[in-house]
Image (cartoon, rainbow, N blue to C red):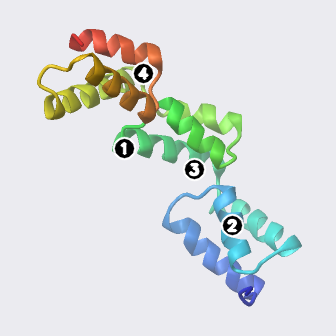
Amino acid sequence: MQKPSISRDAALLRLQRYCAFQDRCHLEVRRKLLDLGIYGQDLEDIIVQLIEDNFLDEERFARSFARGKFQIKGWGRVRIRQELNARQISAYCQRKAMEEIDEATYIQKLYQLLDAKVQREYVQPNPAEKQTLFQWALRKGYETELIRDVFQQLGL
């Protein structure tokens, strides 16, 4: 059963609060409007209004998303790009988002993640455990060559 539609002004106010709480991408806002029963030109007008009032900014969203997922969850660039693609973020905004990740910090983060995981879970990893560890780093979204380099630095 479809939810009753709310007024355009009420939807705009609700979406302004939704976007003010945290940065959102256009896809999230579009889905929220559809959930509220707002369709067609009203939906497009609300999105335009949110952009004009600076509540909605894809580049800002992409930058904060990349920064947060890297710093808090320890995701690599590959995973971050996949998630941005799933949210239909433009290639330009994805490039801008990757600028948020400093190369030296990126390598150091992978080193810290792998070192901590080895210390926590393995005494001296055997070949099967090394493969598991390698796969774990790939799932986190780090590049194969970088993982190999860090493995070498860790003596794995």
Label drawn at residue 145: none
Q: Are marks 3 and 4 in contact (CB under 8 Å)?
A: no
Kindly state the secondary structure of the residue where label 1 is placed: helix
Q: Residues within 10 Å of mark 3 (few under 14, many from 20)?
A: many
Q: Residues within 10 Å of mark 2 (few under 14, many from 20)?
A: few
Tell me how far mark 1 sits from mark 4, CA to CA. Answer: 17 Å
Q: Is 55 drawn above or below residue 77 in the view shown?
A: below
Judged from the image, the secondary structure of the residue bearing numbered disc 4 is helix
Label 1: which residue?
73
Left or right of 147, for residue 57:
right
Label annotation for residue 61: 3
- The residues tagged by marks 3 and 1 sit, at their Cα atoms, a distance apart of 17 Å
Given the image, on which type of amino acid does mark 1 rest? Lys
Q: Name the residue rendered at 27%, 27% in the picture.
A: 114
Q: Is there CB contact under 8 Å for labels 1 and 4?
A: no
Q: Position of 82 compared to 66: left or right? A: right
Mark 3 → mark 2, Cα distance in angstroms: 16 Å
Closer to the observer: label 1 or label 4?
A: 1
Q: Judge whether 149 appears above or below 65 on screen.
A: above
Q: Point out which mark residue 103 bears.
A: 4
SS at mark 3 in the image:
helix
Disc nearer the start of the sequence (3/2): 2
Amino acid type at image mark 3 = Phe
Compute the Cα span from label 3 to label 4: 21 Å
Q: Earlier in the sequence, mark 3 or mark 4?
A: 3
- Position of the N terminus, as image quadrant, is bottom right
Instruction: Look at label 4 and name its amino acid.
Output: Glu
Amino acid type at circle 2 is Arg
What element does badge 2 sit on? helix
Question: In this figure, which residue is indicated by the disc labeled 2?
Answer: 31
